């Protein structure tokens, strides 16, 4: 009789919701770790709550506030006897105070140390850290905006510029300045916004590169050693928000991958990084790259790396947090094929990308070879503006980039979400665009092709949809069920 | 059941002449109908627009299910009365479909003198409600009427078949379980106030809808009380204070939407299980009817050719094809439903009368509706026929026809004269629906005979007065008599007086009958039973 | 009662000419024949002019969602009257231009406000939008609190005009 192997943790809790909560729970189950999840009343019927071994309701002034309530979540962990917490992304994923509160309660935070999170969370400090270790950062001005000479120094960088909040990140708190006369006002607005958003009015100004690529490198570190799992290209962005991501980047060859990987591993190693992290770079058409920021969490777009490298990144996070040494060797990490992720969001692409709300009336997720859908959706779910509009991630893997594109397109087209408007058609238009097929995907992609991406669907498709709507309409069905066949067949006749 | 073999040829001179003639006749009918439906003085249109009211046909279009038929009754009612002052008798009636349910429509027309009721308006509304009673159909009233047209009040108020009958019919319908809904778009004053009030459901429109026994001027005159329309009988008051109306609507569109919702809650009764097959279009083109019906009412034609353009697959299982051949009898399907058809192919003799009586008995026994295609100059006269008891045989036919329990439908295809009109289910014999083709004529006897008789009487009268009319005077008398006679024997006169349920373009006959048969299935068919037959 | 539908802000007209198993429709003036056979609560086969297409459809009041040939359509049936079940706003109600979350509410009931004065800050899509007074007047109702989310068209604040 052999004893069952001990799980890495006696119990772990997911402090998140939606697709990422399910993703982490799935991993915990595969690792044999009893799971728990916290949830706000709005997510009572979510699959995550159903799939976790235990679920604890938390409350707040708003649903978001509940998921940000450190005190409540730590108390719930203590009550359940949780040994570790996975924060997912967003909410408390990069919150050092949360990590410390857990540590104080004797609970493991699945992620890097609070110090590393603080370092990387402060964009000014992290840039200095990276520069000090000899890695390139974009030309910038980091004086306090109130300092004399700031404006001149900023103007000296050359326009356009981007004003960023030091405590920002993920596309939040960024303002582009096209010319000198806009600068003063932009600085004032940015500082006040930074103060209001992040409670930290510090800002800095960077040279703004248009039409560059946004390439990020996935790293794993155990504090001693770090490896990279190649790059993801996330250049297809709208207003600094990623829309489509892929791995590997069509613009990165093996040599460049080695250079980017070395830089990312160097930065992670310098920080004695523990867990999964992402080092974001700007990649110019000339082949230069600059450090942008490091995200100390699992990224939304992590599945593309998982599919290409065959590694469960969340499981690696858990193992590292449990004190296990990194089991991966850089030499053995080879990309296999190509993967593409599309962010399915509740938004009205044709209507200025305003968020859509509604109830999920019918749901059919894509299936098929090489297709992975990470979703937290369930029929009956109310999609409100309380949370991020991300509904699901439609991911496809194939032996070649074109195969991955074709599978992702097929998956998008067979994804059925009824009850709330989504950007599925817009995503499909991106994937089907010839420039995307060529890999011409810099950050100007969407701006350049927006009109084509938003082109109206063909009239015959519209007519068919209207016919279907007419026939599916409850009123039509009630009328037709009640109507004598004679009247139905006679149609709109009159004498 | 065999397809009727046609003998007509579209290339023949007679076909072409008939067709040219009939297209003109139908064209004139359509023009008159269009005028009755749509020609309104600008000031009336503007008045309605000012009041934020839609034209009655716009209301109907929104109310009825799209993609469904509307069988309008008597669109040319009153076309020869009141100097044309009451087109369509100032109202729209018919059978339409709301929420898949057949309903009888009674729709005021406020674009004609504020929807005031003329005597023929009253007659038309009563007829629509009679149709609802006979077929046990629900009724939707679209109310917007100024009330009785006072100059003619003595012709519309007191008698049995006058305005009171409308309300009596409403009560009867309710007792039969036939639902009624009133949409109050305009004023319902005095008697008119009882239409929504006697309905099972009512919706009233804010601002324009009002229900009261006496309007503000009458109240002022009677009691000195000064009161606004809204206070006296407006939408808010009736839906929240008096409970006279059920639903408040902010505007006409909402009233119609509420009305549709109400109708869609109504139970649907089991229909009479009439034999039915899959419907089939006639094999022969119904447009041939224009080439079949002669250009002169006196010319004979084979009614089988007409039947072949109306029934499914042009098939007829003819009954006694070789007996009493001036009457065609047989079973056919119409929109899939089994019917017994009787059509005149000449004057009625003893044998054809007996054949008719027997065939109608078969249809009653079989529970099959009867369809009459009239082209009849009457029963045969003369010593020989009287000796054979022609009236005795005619009486059998009339008795069986009058006592038939199955639904009956009549089409006046050409001439309808004398007792033939009765035997073939004329207006007095309660056909569920009766239609006239536009060129058809109807009178107690044919024009020639009638004119000759009238001229003889006139000359005798002149002679008694010592006058001796010369040939020219005789011609004039004869022409005057004929003109007057023609005027009152035309289909337009008949339909003006509501002797029928409307003039039909012949090609519309099949659909009109189909809707009528479908409607008839809402009421149970009675057991066959007759009076005493003189054998 | 033929229907007008709205898709992406454009209006389209569907006329039913014949009903029954195979319906004849006229869509924006072009005729077609269509039928729909259901295979599940929300899934079925649409036949248009003899060609079959798998279809999914679901309805939320006047809005129909249709998934057809890889595309999802949001089709709204336009009614000729206001839906009173929504409990409409009084005049002067300031409606949310998009769904979002209230960040700051800067006025209270009874406050005198000037035209274009900032009343609230809302956030949607990581973007903050100012809600300003359309007219000078007095705040008569505040319908949303900081942190609360709301739908597009929801009344946030009501201002009664006073010049």
Image (tube, grey):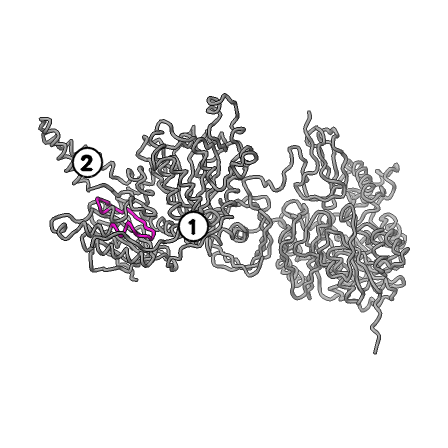
Residue placed most toward the observer, A316 or A486: A486
Q: Marks 1 and 2, Cα distance to the nearest angstrom? A: 44 Å
Q: Looking at the rendering, which quadrant does residue B90 occupy?
A: top left
Is A454 placed above or below C114 here?
below
Q: Is residue C51 left or right of residue A46?
A: left
Look at the image and say whether residue B399 sits in the magenta stretch: yes
Residue, far front: B532
Who's the residue at 39% across and 53% down the image? B524
Residue B494 makes an appearance in the image: yes
| Element on which disc 2 rests | helix
Who's the residue at 20% across and 49% down the image? B300
Name the mark nearer the viewer: 1 or 2: 2
Residue A48, how many percent across, how many down?
Answer: 74, 58
Residue B346, how many percent across, how many down?
Answer: 20, 51
Residue placed most toward the observer, A434 or B8: B8
Q: Is residue B147 left or right of residue B381?
A: right
Look at the image and say whether residue C92 sits in the magenta stretch: no
| Element on which disc 1 rests | loop
Output the chain of dot 1.
A
Circle 1 residue = A491
Q: Which span of residues is magenta-colored?
A: B398-420
For the C terminus of chain A, which image quadrant?
Answer: top left
Circle 2 residue = B482
Residue C30 makes an appearance in the image: no
Residue placed most toward the observer, B143 or A206: B143
Residue B26, how many percent across, how many down?
Answer: 30, 43
């Amino acid at each position: 009789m052999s004893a069952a192997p001990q799980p890495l943790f006696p119990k772990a809790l997911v402090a998140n919701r939606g697709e990422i909560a399910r993703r982490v729970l799935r991993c915990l189950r595969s690792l044999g770790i009893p799971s728990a999840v916290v949830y706000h009343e709005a997510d009572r019927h979510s699959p995550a709550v159903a799939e976790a071994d235990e679920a604890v309701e938390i409350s707040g002034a708003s649903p978001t506030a509940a998921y940000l309530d450190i005190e409540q979540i730590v108390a719930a962990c203590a009550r359940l006897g949780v040994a570790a917490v996975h924060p997912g992304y967003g909410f408390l994923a990069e919150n050092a105070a949360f990590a410390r509160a857990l540590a104080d309660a004797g609970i493991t935070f699945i992620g890097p140390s609070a110090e590393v999170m603080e370092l990387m969370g402060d964009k000014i400090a992290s840039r200095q850290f990276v520069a000090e270790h000899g890695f390139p950062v974009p030309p910038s001005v980091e004086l306090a905006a109130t300092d004399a000479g700031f404006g001149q120094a900023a103007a000296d960088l050359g326009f356009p510029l981007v004003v960023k909040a030091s405590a920002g990140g993920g596309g939040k708190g960024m303002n582009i300045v096209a010319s000198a006369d806009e600068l003063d006002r932009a600085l004032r607005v940015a500082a006040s916004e930074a103060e209001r958003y992040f409670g930290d009015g510090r800002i800095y100004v960077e040279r703004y590169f248009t039409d560059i690529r946004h390439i990020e490198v996935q790293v794993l570190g155990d504090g001693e050693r770090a490896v990279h799992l190649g790059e993801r290209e996330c250049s297809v962005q709208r207003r600094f928000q990623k829309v489509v991501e892929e791995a590997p980047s069509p613009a990165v060859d093996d040599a460049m991958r080695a250079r980017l990987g070395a830089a990312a591993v160097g930065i992670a190693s310098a920080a004695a990084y523990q867990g999964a992290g992402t080092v974001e770079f700007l990649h110019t058409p000339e082949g230069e790259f600059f450090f942008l920021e490091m995200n100390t969490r699992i990224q939304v777009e992590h599945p593309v790396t998982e599919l290409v490298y065959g590694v469960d990144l969340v499981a690696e996070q858990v193992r590292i947090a449990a004190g296990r040494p990194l089991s991966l060797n850089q030499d053995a990490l080879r990309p296999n094929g190509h993967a593409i992720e599309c962010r399915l969001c509740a938004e009205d692409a044709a209507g200025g990308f305003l968020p859509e709300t509604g109830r999920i009336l019918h749901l059919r997720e894509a299936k098929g070879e090489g297709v992975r859908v990470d979703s937290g959706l369930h029929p009956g779910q109310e999609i409100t503006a309380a949370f991020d509009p991300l509904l699901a991630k439609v991911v496809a893997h194939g032996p070649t980039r074109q195969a991955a594109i074709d599978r992702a397109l097929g998956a998008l087209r067979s994804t059925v979400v009824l009850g709330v408007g989504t950007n599925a058609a817009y995503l499909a238009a991106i994937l089907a665009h010839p420039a995307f097929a060529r890999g011409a995907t810099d950050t100007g992609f969407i701006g350049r092709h927006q009109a084509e991406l938003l082109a109206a669907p063909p009239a015959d498709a519209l007519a068919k949809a209207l016919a279907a709507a007419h026939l599916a309409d409850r009123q039509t069905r009630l009328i037709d069920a009640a109507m004598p066949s004679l009247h139905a067949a006679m149609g709109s006749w009159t004498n | 059941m065999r397809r009727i073999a046609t003998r007509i040829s579209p290339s023949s001179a007679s076909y072409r002449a008939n067709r040219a003639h009939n297209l003109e006749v139908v064209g004139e009918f359509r023009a008159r109908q269009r005028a009755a439906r749509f020609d309104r003085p600008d000031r009336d249109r503007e008045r309605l627009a000012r009041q934020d009211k839609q034209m009655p046909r716009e209301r109907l279009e929104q109310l009825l299910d799209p993609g469904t038929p509307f069988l309008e009754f008597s669109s040319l009612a009153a076309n020869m009365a009141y100097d044309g002052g009451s087109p369509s008798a100032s109202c729209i009636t018919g059978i339409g479909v709301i929420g898949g349910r057949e309903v009888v429509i009674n729709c005021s027309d406020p674009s004609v003198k504020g929807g005031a009721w003329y005597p023929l308006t009253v007659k038309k509304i009563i007829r629509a409600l009679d149709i609802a009673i006979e077929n046990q159909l629900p009724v939707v009233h679209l109310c917007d009427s100024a009330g009785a047209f006072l100059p003619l009040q003595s012709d519309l108020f007191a008698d049995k078949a006058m305005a009171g009958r409308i309300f009596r019919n409403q009560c009867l319908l309710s007792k039969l379980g036939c639902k009624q809904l009133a949409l109050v778009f305009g004023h319902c004053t005095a008697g008119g106030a009882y239409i929504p009030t006697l309905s099972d459901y009512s919706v009233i429109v804010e601002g324009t809808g009002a229900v009261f026994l006496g309007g503000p001027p009458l109240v002022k005159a009677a009691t000195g009380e000064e009161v606004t329309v809204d206070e006296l009988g407006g939408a808010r008051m009736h839906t929240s204070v008096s409970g006279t109306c059920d639903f408040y609507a902010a505007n006409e569109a909402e009233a119609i939407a509420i009305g549709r919702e109400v109708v869609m809650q109504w139970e649907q009764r089991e229909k009479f299980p009439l034999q039915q097959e899959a419907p089939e279009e006639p094999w022969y083109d119904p447009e041939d009817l224009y080439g079949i019906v002669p250009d002169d009412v006196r010319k004979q034609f084979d009614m089988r050719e007409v039947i072949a353009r109306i029934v499914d697959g042009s098939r007829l299982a003819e009954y006694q094809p070789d007996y009493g051949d001036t009457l065609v009898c047989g079973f056919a399907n119409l929109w899939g439903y089994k019917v017994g058809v009787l059509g005149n192919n000449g004057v009625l003799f003893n044998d054809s009368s007996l054949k008719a009586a027997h065939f109608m008995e078969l249809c009653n026994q079989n529970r099959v509706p009867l369809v009459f295609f009239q082209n009849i100059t009457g029963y045969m006269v003369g010593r020989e026929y009287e000796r054979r008891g022609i009236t005795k045989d005619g009486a059998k036919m009339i008795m069986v026809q009058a006592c038939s329990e199955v639904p009956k439908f009549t089409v006046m295809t050409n001439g309808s004269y004398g007792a033939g009109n009765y035997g073939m289910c004329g207006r007095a014999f309660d056909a569920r629906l009766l239609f006239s083709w536009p060129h058809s004529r109807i009178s107690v006897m044919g024009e020639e005979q009638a004119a000759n008789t009238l001229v003889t009487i006139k000359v005798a009268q002149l002679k008694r007065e010592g006058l001796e009319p010369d040939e020219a005077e005789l011609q004039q008398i004869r022409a005057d008599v004929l003109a007057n006679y023609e005027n009152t024997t035309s289909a337009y006169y008949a339909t003006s007086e509501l002797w029928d349920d409307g003039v039909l373009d012949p090609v519309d006959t099949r659909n009109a009958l189909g809707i009528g048969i479908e409607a008839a299935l809402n009421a149970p068919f009675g057991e066959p039973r007759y009076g005493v037959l003189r054998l | 009662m033929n229907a007008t539908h709205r898709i992406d802000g454009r209006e389209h007209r569907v006329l039913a000419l014949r009903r029954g198993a195979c319906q004849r429709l006229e869509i924006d003036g072009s005729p077609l024949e269509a039928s729909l056979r259901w295979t599940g609560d929300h899934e079925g086969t649409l036949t248009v002019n003899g060609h079959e297409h798998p279809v999914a459809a679901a309805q939320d009041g006047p809005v129909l969602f249709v998934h057809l040939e890889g595309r999802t359509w949001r089709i709204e049936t336009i009614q000729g009257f206001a839906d009173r079940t929504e409990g409409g706003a009084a005049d002067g109600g300031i409606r949310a231009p998009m769904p979002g979350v209230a960040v700051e509410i800067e006025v209270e009931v009874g406050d005198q406000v000037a035209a274009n004065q900032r009343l609230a800050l809302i956030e949607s899509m990581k973007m903050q939008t100012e809600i300003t007074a359309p007219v000078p007047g007095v705040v008569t109702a505040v319908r949303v609190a900081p942190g609360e989310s709301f739908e597009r068209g929801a009344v946030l604040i009501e201002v009664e005009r006073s010049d």
